[in-house]
Image (tube, rainbow, N blue to C red):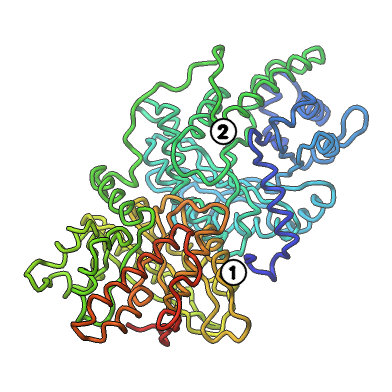
Amino acid sequence: MASYSQYLTKEKEDELRSIANAIVAPGKGILAADESTGSMEKKMASIGLPNTEENRRKYRQLLFTANPDLNKHISGVIMFDETFYQKTDDGVLFVDVLKKQNIIPGIKVDKGIVPMGGTVGECTTQGMDDLNNRCANYKKNGAQFAKWRCVHKISAVTPSHTALVEIAQVLARYASICQQNGLVPIVEPEILPDGEHDLARCQKITETVLSYCYRALNEHHVFLEGTLLKPNMVTAGQGFKGPMPSPDDIALATVTALQRSVPPAVPGVVFLSGGQSEEDASRNLNAINKVVGKKPWALTFSYGRALQASCLAKWAGKDENVKAAQDVFFGRAQANSLASLGKYSGDANADAAASHCQCSCMASYSQFLTKEKEDELRSIAQAIIAPGKGILGEFVLMWYRQLLFTGNPDLGKYISGVIMFDETFYQKADDGVPFVDVLKKQNIIPGIKDGAQFAKWRCVHKISSVTPSSTALVEIAQVLARYASICQQNGLVPIVEPEILPDGNHDIAKCQKITEVVLSYCYRALNENHVFLEGTLLKPNMVTAGQGFTGSKPTPEEVGFATVTALQRSVPAAVPGVVFLSGGQSEEEATLNLNAINKVPGKKPWVLTFSYSRALQASCLAKWGGKSENVKDAQAILLQRAQSNSAASLGKYAAGSNAGGVAGKSLFVANHAY
């Protein structure tokens, strides 16, 4: 289940995962002490001190030896190259000083911002040429993680597509090189606070920037479980003319942006402070951690000035002030430790936080969907994936729909929705009642394949030595995104179905990687088309070996783990639910695999249920045989399969309790055309 075994060994993945998790341990964050020599010039000038190497060393020594309990609040320190090789007064390397305190040493590896040609004042980051050698040396000398910063600006014409692609690719290449050398990469696509933009604009740009980044990280086979993200909080621009958003507004906008763009596989988000005051940075982090909802990542800090400003002022370059300055620094570390747990009550002596205002700007883009429409879509999507329920996909044969829809008064306990063909949507039962009303009377939500309360659109990819191509990945992602946007404009919840066909000789690892790639393309396209993810559902394949695979067939547990891992690496937490297609599996196999998926431990911020057609109906159809006298028995079998998959969607299916006969037969059809 590795990203790609030829890129990282399991031992290296385990090491990277362990380091990343240690950095974002509860109540801990990062001290960013990686200011360049030029940046330190401003700091030293603010206290009237010459910017000499010795003064810089003394200041860093002050920070790194502040308190024997510093490691209770600080898990790691990012250093500049100069600092990485400096020593304390008694000749101990700073790296060793930190390691002795169980604080993880990190290193800034970018070489600064440079203008990007062909853009309107945008920038990229340099330092790639010798990065591999530098990372190897830093790892050899004690570094365990690294940081690379890129920046975006918000204006009427930026960020441009050129900058979005360039920065995402640079960060992905850096991350891959770091991981090859055993360093956890901190990915920092900062959106600068300069500008007059409001909170909603910053939120949307943040979502877009991050969706570009995570598609690029996927394309570069970066092991997300061994990375960290260092983003800006979502704030209004420094030049915004309206009332400044409150911490609660900032928090909701920030968490919403992350939910829509950051895969759950990422262990943690370590926020930069972005020019905020020390107190604002702490209050906003605290508010972020108090937001109710899906937060499958640790949310903590990686602060520079917001940890050091008061400390620097207190020190003022005087030896007699060192202890007092260290106490101030330690106090800020404690404050942000509490904020990372949502337990910070504020500093009564600090400047007041930004003035409060109640913003209603958490929509994707208010001009695209009204809040009422978003609420309606969210409500429908959540009803479809109510616990223990799934979707009945209509079978290709059209003669027995009444049998399906009128099978049992208890069908609504297990089936939340039905996807219909256009013809069926307007048909009626024998007593003249439209099928739509038959379903609604059972509290089953009607959907339609081509376009009701929800819709479905299917695209397919094939796995071979040359497919899926980049052309197909882009085309299918854009088609699904455009469909989803049109659906939402018309009040329909779109089910997005980028199926990967089970044809082929590929193994399960290949299917997993292709699934991750396909989904990362889809979610960047959905973001670009301003689709409201909270009002969508995903209908993917499970991750399986190809039908022509000649090795041992993966077990349900292996299918479950590979499937959940692929979702964790590609599907944003904002998506309410995943309704799997059965993809040619037998009825029993589809149920067993769904059950195994729901039993996988770990981050699963979506409901994981079913949208089965043949895997719900094959036995029912065989029992019916087109004979009216068999209708009741056939309906009983349909209900039984619905009950089985209901239990599987909760991880409570007793294996084999409904196996045998038709239920155990493969339903694979070459090219899966229907």
Front one among 79 and 574 = 574
Query: Which of 482/614 is in front?
Result: 614
Which residue is depicted at the point 49% across and 69% down?
A: 592
- Element under label 1? helix
Label 2: how many residues lie within 10 Å, few (<14), some (14-19) or many (20+)? Answer: many
Camera-side mark, 2 or 1: 1
The numbered dot on residue 521 is none
Q: Name the residue: 69% across, 23% down.
A: 45
Which amino acid does the dot numbered 1 rest on?
Glu
Q: Residue 273 in the image: x percent, y percent?
A: 56, 33
What residue is shown at x 53% (from left), y 20% (from top)? 345
**Can you give x and y, in whole percent of width and height, for residue 521 in the image?**
46, 64
Pointer 1 residue: 558
Specify the quadrant of the image occupied by residue 362: top left
* Cα–Cα gap, marks 2 and 1: 41 Å
Residue topped by disc 2 = 273
